[in-house]
Amino acid sequence: MLIIDRIVSQVGRRVDEASPMVDARLPDGSRINAIIPPLALDGPSLSIRRFGRKRYNIDDLVEKKTIVPEIVEFLRTIVRARLNILVCGGTGSGKTTMLNCMSLFVPADERIVTIEDSAELMLQQPHVVRLETRPANVEGKGEVSQRDLVRNTLRMRPDRIIVGEVRGGEVFDMLQAMSTGHDGSIATIHANTPRDSMGRLEMMMLLSGVQIPQRAMRQQIASALNIIVHVSRLSDGSRKVMRISEISGMEGEMVMMQDLFEFRRTGIGPGGEVLGAFVATGIRSTYSQRLEAAGYKLDGKIFRQTIG
């Protein structure tokens, strides 16, 4: 208890029976979570999440074989052409790292507003406004949610909005922003596949409290999002971009989605490493004309060959 009190006191928060759990950030940026009895049955528990000093860039991910240069060029193009992107994956899969790396493709003269539950993004552009949620105090007052921040962001004239992780009703406001003038926005979401992320978005839209038909929700998703990047942590501990999919509209009641690139596993190596290759599915992006209209042209070969 004494250690917990000393650490939490550094950030001006106190943990006691009236407030038996706390989230806070230390001066060096590390995140801490403390929880004590009666919630922690076997005694006080303290968790510290530290962030490495090294800031990974896209070249580091290529070196670690998380991604290949051809896919990097595709991501660079869609970010600069202001397509809306969703990064999905499980816990610890590298979603935030991927988002950080992709943000480096945003031109330096654009104004970016980031919204996070716990500040982790480290953007390098000069015009970045970082916003972070605030939990309620011991009296249950003063909470500022991500939805509150998204709504406020729309009044700040951002060129792009980056949401560290969508997890609730803010997704409704975020999707509306994406489809009404804030092109080029990026967000992450916990989901195991691109298709699963669609179901998660629908569920979160219901949490917003807005009662709209399921078809209308799916139309909102299809009109707002363009590209989904799926990242995963494999059995050997490596992280890979498993799939890049695009949303191509609606057909009946379904959001239409097609894969452009994927990592195809072929087996396990003698040391337990996952073997495989990055391949193009042979489908040319439906956004090719939009990319060309924005002044970016991709070599068609990238969509029809084994690329790594």
Image (cartoon, rainbow, N blue to C red):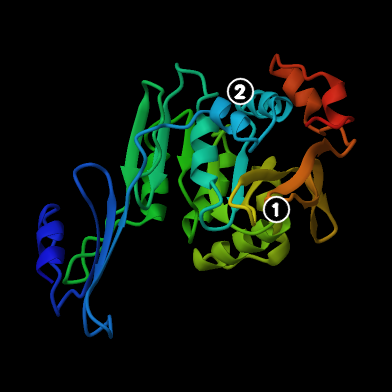
At 28% from the left and 48% from the top, the residue drawn is 30
Residue 151 is situated, as x and y percent measured from the top left of the image, at 41, 47
On-image quarter of the N terminus: bottom left
- Label number found at residue 194: 1
At 15% from the left and 69% from the top, the residue drawn is 15
Residue 183 is situated, as x and y percent measured from the top left of the image, at 58, 33
Q: Nearer the viewer, mark 2 or mark 1?
A: 1
Q: In the image, what residue type sits under mark 2?
A: Arg
Asked if residue 217 shows in the view, the reply is no
For this rendering, which residue is in front, 278 or 252?
A: 278
- Label number found at residue 153: none
> Is 130 on the left-hand or right-hand side of 13?
right
> Is 144 on the left-hand or right-hand side of 36?
right
On-image quarter of the C terminus: top right
For this rendering, which residue is in front, 268 or 183?
A: 268
Mark 1: few, some, or many residues within 10 Å (few <14, many ≥20)?
many
